[in-house]
Amino acid sequence: MLKRMIAGLCRTTVLVALAAATSTAHGEVSVNIGIGIPVGPPPPPRVEVIAPVPAGYVWAPGYWAWHGNNYIWIGGRWMLARPGYVWVPDRWEHRDGRWHAAPGQWQREHRRFVREERRRDRHEHRDHGRGR
């Protein structure tokens, strides 16, 4: 009899979970969790020898990740480029006396800054008809 009660309770739990998962209500939740590690800084980055960049890709450099109770090296990788974005690599930041992992992410390219840099570079390379 106890087995039947437990089996019935399990079936009811599964049915309630399925009903909740298929409900028509929609929502979106975004959660960012920061973990401060009360130990020393990560080791210096390793030197990675990389092949020439394949067309349409960007290099995401390797980084130290916290795993269990020590740092492990995660090797760099090629990622498909995203037009209009730049890759900001994974890194460690020291805040409030602790080290915090900041995951890599795509950020919008600052077009105005890029245009101004290109304009300045073109201006510096002109001879303005002076024969220099």
Image (cartoon, grey):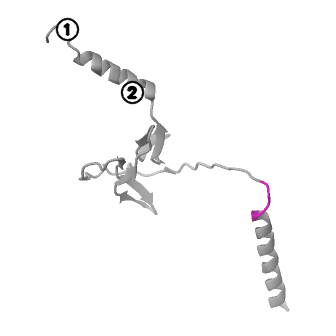
Of 82 and 41, nearer the camera is 82
Of 61 and 3, nearer the camera is 61
Name the residue at 34% across, 20% down. 119
Query: Which residue is identified by label 1?
Result: 129
Q: Looking at the picture, how far across and down is residue 123, in whole percent?
A: 28, 16
Residue that protrudes farthest toward the front in the picture: 129
Q: Residues within 10 Å of mark 2 (few under 14, many from 20)?
A: few
Describe the element under mark 2 as helix, strand or loop: helix
27 left or right, relative to 44? right
Question: Which mark is drawn over residue 114?
Answer: 2
To which quarter of the image does residue 3 belong? bottom right
Q: Looking at the picture, how far across and down is residue 83, in whole percent?
A: 44, 40
Q: Looking at the picture, how far across and down is residue 64, in whole percent?
A: 38, 54
Residue that protrudes farthest toward the bottom in the picture: 1
Of 75 and 115, nearer the camera is 115
Name the residue at 20% across, 12% down. 127
Prevailing secondary structure of the magenta residues = loop
* Amino acid type for the residue under numbered disc 1: Gly
**Which residues, given as a range, are shown in magenta?**
21-25
Q: Residues within 10 Å of mark 1 (few under 14, many from 20)?
A: few
38 w.r.t. 12: above or below? above
Q: Can residue 90 be seen in this snapshot?
A: yes
Total numbered circles: 2
* Amino acid type for the residue under numbered disc 2: Val
Name the residue at 39% across, 27% down. 114
The quadrant of the image that shows the C terminus is: top left
> Marks 2 and 1, Cα distance to the nearest angstrom?
26 Å
35 left or right, relative to 124? right
